[in-house]
Amino acid sequence: MKLNTLSITELKNRFDAGQATAVQATTDTLAAIAKATEDNSFITIASSEKLLKQAEQIDAARQSGSDDSRLTGPLAGVPIAIKDNICVRGLRTTAGSRMLENFVSPYDATVVERLKAAGAILIGKTNLDEFAMGSFSTTSFFGVIKNPRVANATPGGSSGGSAAAVAADLCAAALGSDTGGSIRMPAAQTCIVGIKPTYGRVSRHGLIAFASSLDQIGPMTKTVEDAAILLEVIAGHDPHDATSSTRPVPRFSDAVHQGIESGVRGMKIGIPKEYFEESLDIDPVVRSQIQKALERLETAGATLIELSLPHTMYATLTYHTIAAAEASSNLARFDGVRFGHRTADANTLNDLYELSRAEGFGTEVKRRILLGTLMLSTGYYDRYFRKAQQARNLITHDFTRAFQGVDIIATPASPCSKFVLPDANTQSDSAFHADRFNVACNLAGLPAISVPCNALTRDPNTDQPVGLQLIAPAFEENRLFQAAACLEYLQNQSRRMA
């Protein structure tokens, strides 16, 4: 068995047992990437010479009993990919845009520092929708990303490259970012696990900002336990990020073991009627598989309780208003003067600004910048942006009230089981509907996980991935890991018995 097909947990077990080495894991992963020419999941691959040298040092440290965490830490020797809007020192960080096509980061994002401190082997930077603006992985300057699970389809976005890389066994795990579903949507579309942590649980220092009050970095992995392990490493307070929480980081892996050993007995799971109405255009495959997953959890001891989140209907409009306004502000720095793409055709300073931005940004990014600028302009601020903030408060209050009676909330992670090309290129209208199950969690700052809820054949021509989204109160990721691990365990048991 090639080591690139293994999860973090499986790799660590083999390393500890002396059955595999970091050099072997790195070699197998690089070989798999070299063969995967069609998915377009990576933008930049790190130097194989440097990666193998790091792997050799890790193997030597294991044999010598070194206590250097960078060589023997919880992720030592594990190949992990990084979404290309997260800075890695010495590697290109493009955000999927021509604007930053040649930008090489001079520093590491905090999450990258923590991965390196844990011994991870950072294999490369993954493709994404430009500046993380998109739901289908079709807006990158570096080309459309293909879904390795479904023929002629994209993996969803914006963290499509990270999702595709994990699903295609091109890394053991990856980091993505989630502003309005950008981890959970592609996780559902590729049948992997993706978690958006509570806003503030993970530092955003070194993440190229899209919408600062919504963005959050999170793990994308092959198993629930892997997601818990990875989140334990990257979470925690960071003095470089004023929005990062000072709360201690729990041992999320303990919640995973609890979910496997004790299940979800006594857990109350809320089913919001607004996410399951017959009038919603939900793929029948999604409805069927979500229902089966909920029945499994109920059989395992959970109580399903119907509830209402009455302001859900305003979530998508609210999200797109706030996200566009914040994007307009954040992307103002890319002006052709300080860094980023600079036009060669400018005769005046105004030409420099206008042409650099016109050439550097893609169509979808320009659309959102223009929309956001309008929302923030005199005469429109109160009518749109302020109203959106008021609606955001109502949506947040809906969740607060709902969690007084339930432990977690369950919904589909995506209304579709696949984003087939070329239909996925109808970006704006389709994204507006595709995101509707995800954006409310970002508006309320809540943690949410997408966990696969159907077995796949690994035949891209027949597979239809479906993800169950579980939502918890702020800083209660443990509840998500417990329920997700229980569901994953039950499904694995069912497959073995089939």
Image (spheres, rainbow, N blue to C red):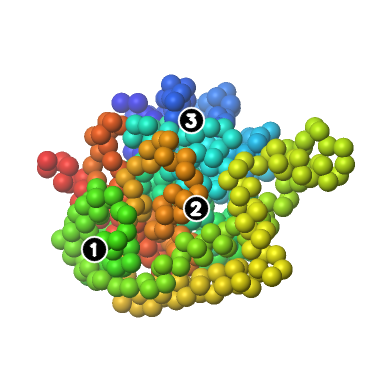
Q: Position of residue 180 (x, y in %)?
A: 48, 56
Q: Residue furthest right?
A: 348
Horizontally, residue 262 falls left or right of residue 187, namely left
Q: Which mark is residue 81?
A: none
Q: Is residue 271 above or below residue 21?
A: below
Q: Quadrant of the C terminus?
A: top left
Q: Is residue 203 above or below residue 128?
A: below
Name the residue: 33% across, 67% down. Answer: 274
Name the residue: 32% across, 54% down. Answer: 281
- Whether the residues at callouts 2 and 3 have beta carbons within 8 Å, the answer is no
Q: Label 2 sits on what residue type?
A: Asp
Q: Which residue is mark 2?
A: 178
Q: Residues within 10 Å of mark 2 (few under 14, many from 20)?
A: many
Q: Is residue 394 above or below residue 188?
A: below
Q: Residue furthest left?
A: 497
Horizontally, residue 383 falls left or right of residue 15, namely right
How much space separates mark 1 and mark 2, taking CA atoms? 27 Å
Image mark count: 3
